Amino acid sequence: MTPNDDDEMRDPRNEARVDPRVDRRLDQVMSELRETYNVPPAHPPLEAMWTEIDRALDAVQVVPLRPVAGARPRRSLERTGWGLGIAAALLAGIGIGRMSTAAGVDPRGSATRVAQATPGVPAAVQRASDPVRPKPAGSERAGGESTTDPRPSAGGGAERGAAGPRRSAAAGMTLVAAQPTDEVVDEESSPRRYLGQATALLITLAGDAPRSGDDSRMVRRASELLTTTRLLLDAPSIDEKTRALLEDLELVLTQVVRLQTESGREDLRLIREALEQRDLLPRLHTAVVAGSDD
Amino acid sequence: MSNRAHVTTATARTFAAHDRVNEPELIQRVLAGDRNAARALYDAHAERVYRLVHRLCGDDDLAQDLTQETFIKAFAQLRTFRGDSALSTWLHRVAVSVAMNGMRKVKRFRERETEVDEELPAVSYGSPEQVDLRERVAAAIDALPEIYRTTLIMHDIEGYTHGEIARTMDVAEGTCKSRLSHARAQLRRVLAPFVEGQA
C-alpha cells in the first residue's frame, strides 16, 4: 500500500462547477483533518491485540470441508427448518462456550473491557478464557465423528489436541472448536442447550428478584452466551429470522455484560424493557420448540 | 512528524517487513499450524490494518476489537486466500468488511440506547473558526454513506491509491474515483458558505 501523491483525480464534470476557492479550502481542511480526524494512537496496542488473537486461535480453527468417511448425510435446511440451521452453526460456537464454562471467564476479559470502555459497543472479538487443555492420547471420537483430515491444527500443532472437525453449514468450511475432549458434544441437543441457556438467563433477568451476589455468575453466563451468539451470527447459513433473533439476543447479552461495572438497576430496567419490546422470550421459546421438532 | 510522513513510514515498515519474509511460505506455515508464522504475518500487517480501522471507527477500543476480529477471521479463512491479490490487499478487504459490519452494529446499538452519549471534548488547535470548520467537515464525513466515507478516508486521509482502494473494496477503479468525487462534492457543500462568507 503506497501513498497516493501521484494519484489524485478529480471528476472533470464536477471541476467545471466547483468554485476553485472552495476546492482549495477543501484540500486545506482535508490536510488538517489528517492530523485530527480519528487519529490512531502513535503506538497501537499490537501486543495486546496479538494476545487476544492468539487466544482466539486456540479456540477456533478452520480447515477446508472434506467428505467425512462414515458421516451422516446432511439434511437440507429446507427440510428440517431453521432450527437445524442453528444446530449446524452452533457447532462452531459450542466448543468455545464449553471451554468458557469449564474454565470460567476472566472478568477482565476483552468483552467486558470493550463494553466498559465503549458503552454500547458489541465486542467484535472475545477471547477464549483459557488455553486448550491437552488432548489425552487416543481420545478421538470413533465412527462417524472421526475425520479423514488429520492435518495439524492451525492453533499450534497437533499437540493442542483439537477435537475432530465439527461440520458447519458454512459453505466449504468446517469450523473446528478446540475443546476439552473428555466431554462429548451432543450435537442433537446443542441448539436446545444454547437456546435453553439463553432462555434461562433471560427469565432470570426478566424476574423481579433484586440483584445480588449472583450478578457475577449471570454476567459470566451472558459473556459465554455472547461468544457463542457472535460465532453463530458469523455463519452464513442462518436464515434472516434466526439472524434477527440472534442479533437481538446479542444486544441484550451485551447489556447484561455491562451490568458488571455500571450502575445496575437502571441498566437492568433497560434490559427488561428491551426484553419486552423485542418479544425476545416468546421468540426464544418458539425457537426452542422448533429445535425440539427437528 | 506529519501524518503523511507517518503513513509513509508505516508503509515503508510494511514493505520492509515483506522483504524480510516470504509471505507464501509464511502462509503455508500458518496453515500447517505454525503460530510463529501467524505472528510474523500479523507483525507485518497489523499496524497498517489498525490505522485504517481506527480512522474508520474513531475509537481506540473498538479499533482494537475490530483489528483482532480482522486477523482472527483472516487466519481462520486463510485457506480461501488464493494469492490472486497481495495478502495485504486481502487483509484490508477483510478489515474494511469487519469494520463496516462492526460500525453498523454500534450505530444500531447506540440508536437503541436511551442514554445520551457524552463525548469527550476533542483535542483541537487553531483559531475557533478553523476548528469549527474542521469539525463541520468532520461531521460531514461522518454523515457520508459508508462506501463514500470509506473511500474518502482511505484516499484523502490515509493516502491509499485508487487502485488499492478498488482492490480492497472489490470495485473498479472508476467506481472508486466516482465515489471519491461524490464524497468531496458533499464536503464542498458544507464548505461553500464558509468560503463565501470570507470573500
Image: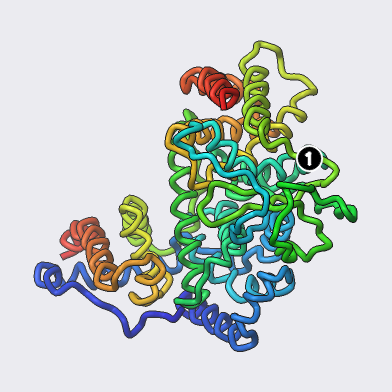
Q: Residue at x 36, y 57 (%)?
A: B138
Residue A284's place in the image compared with B44, above or below, is above
Answer left or right for A187 relative to A122: right
Residue A269 in percent (x, y) is at: 58, 19
The amino acid sitting under disc 1 is Val
Query: Closer to the camera, A146 or A44?
Result: A146
Q: Secondary structure at mark 1?
A: loop
Which residue was labeled with disc 1?
A184
* Residue at the top extreme, as displayed: A208
Residue B135 in percent (x, y) is at: 37, 55
Residue A85's place in the image compared with B169, above or below, is above
Where residue B175 sits, quadrant-wise, is bottom left
* Residue at the front extreme, as displayed: A70
Where residue A289 sits, quadrant-wise, is top right
Can the viewer see residue B110 in this picture?
A: no
**Chain under label 1?**
A
Can the viewer see residue A180 in this picture?
A: yes
Residue A13 in percent (x, y) is at: 11, 70
Query: Closer to the camera, A125 or A259?
Result: A125
